[in-house]
Image: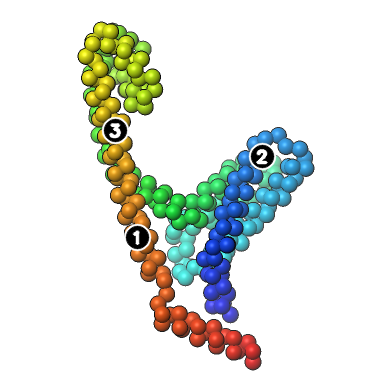
Amino acid sequence: MYKAIKINMNALKNNKIFELLVVSVIIISALEIGAKTFELPDSAVSLTDILDVFITIFFLIELTIRFIADDDKRSFLKKGWNVFDTLVVAISLIPIDNSEMALLARLVRIFRVLRMVSVVPELRILINSLIKALPQLGYVVLLMFIIFYIYAAIGSFMFSQINPKLWGDIAISMLTLFRVMTFEDWTDIQYETMEVYPYSWIFYLTFIFFTAFAFLNMVIGIVVNVMEEEHQAARAEKAEKQPSLLELQQELKEIKALLLTQKK
């Protein structure tokens, strides 16, 4: 009996229509949270409260279906996204009233929008790739800090007399260079120093090349490389989960036996 329920739950979990329904409810949840930020009439407030209860119950049922359909229930909560979904659903069960937990319940309901990441595999791969790329990005950030520090020291020594507000010390100079790197009116800073040092454009162009262009390409390269590894791991995991022909035949035999016992 339990095996039949598990097979049905697994089929429901992998059903495309059910996945679209879950995504639709998440979108409705996001719209409902956004609607509560406006001043609404009493009828609309009551409607959002009813909708909030429906969404919470739906997420609870969906999480239960995923738990029943999971083959290894002991390791269900060892997966990060399952832990996140369980915490969001559990805290969403806290009623929103004037209690001390009301603020926490409201904040967690906002994070229900992030369930889109755990539902859509492509978004999950993207987030996992960004997290795994962080250690490698740390070295890139360290290199960026070294470049910033060198150019900030040079800028402070050369341009502090021209504009102390932008180049007064090394800390302010680093903030100014960040403005240059993001192209926020950086030409105004350049033309101001070029009035005293005509060749100071070399300082800005080399800095932009080392930071904006080289840094961006390094970050993209690291993230793309990690994403490719994640896609390969996902394809390998999917291939392992696909049942073999013998397993399918065994399941068909079990279903036939179950049907025969029910007929008797």
For discs 1 and 3, the disc positioned in front in the rendered view: 3
Question: Does dot 1 land on a helix, a strand or a loop?
Answer: helix
Could you give the CA–CA distance between mark 2 and mark 1, rounded to whole angstroms? 41 Å
Colour theme: rainbow
Question: Which image quarter: residue 222?
Answer: top left
Q: Amino acid at mark 3?
A: Phe
- Image spot of residue 262 (x, y percent): 63, 87
Residue highlighted by disc 3:
213
Question: Does dot 3 land on a helix, a strand or a loop?
Answer: helix
How many residues crowd mark 2 within 10 Å: few (<14), some (14–19), many (20+)? few
The first of marks 3 and 2 along the sequence is 2
User: What residue is shown at x 56% (from left), y 58% (from top)?
Assistant: 20
Q: Report the quarter where the N terminus lies.
A: bottom right
**Residue closest to the far bottom:** 264
Residue in the foreground of this view, choosing between 143 and 216 = 216
Q: Considering only vertical position in the picture, is 169 above or below 19?
A: above
**Residue closest to the far right:** 43
Q: Considering only vertical position in the picture, is 105 above or below 165?
A: below
User: What residue is shown at x 67% (from left), y 35% (from top)?
Assistant: 38
Q: Report the quarter where the C terminus lies.
A: bottom right
The first of marks 1 and 3 along the sequence is 3
Could you give the CA–CA distance between mark 1 and mark 3, rounded to whole angstroms? 30 Å
Residue highlighted by disc 2:
36
Residue in the foreground of this view, choosing between 170 and 221 = 221
The first of marks 2 and 1 along the sequence is 2
Q: Amino acid at mark 1?
A: Ala
- Image spot of residue 98 (x, y percent): 69, 41
Numbered tag placed on residue 233 in the rendering = 1
User: What residue is shown at x 38% (from left), y 60% (from top)?
Assistant: 234
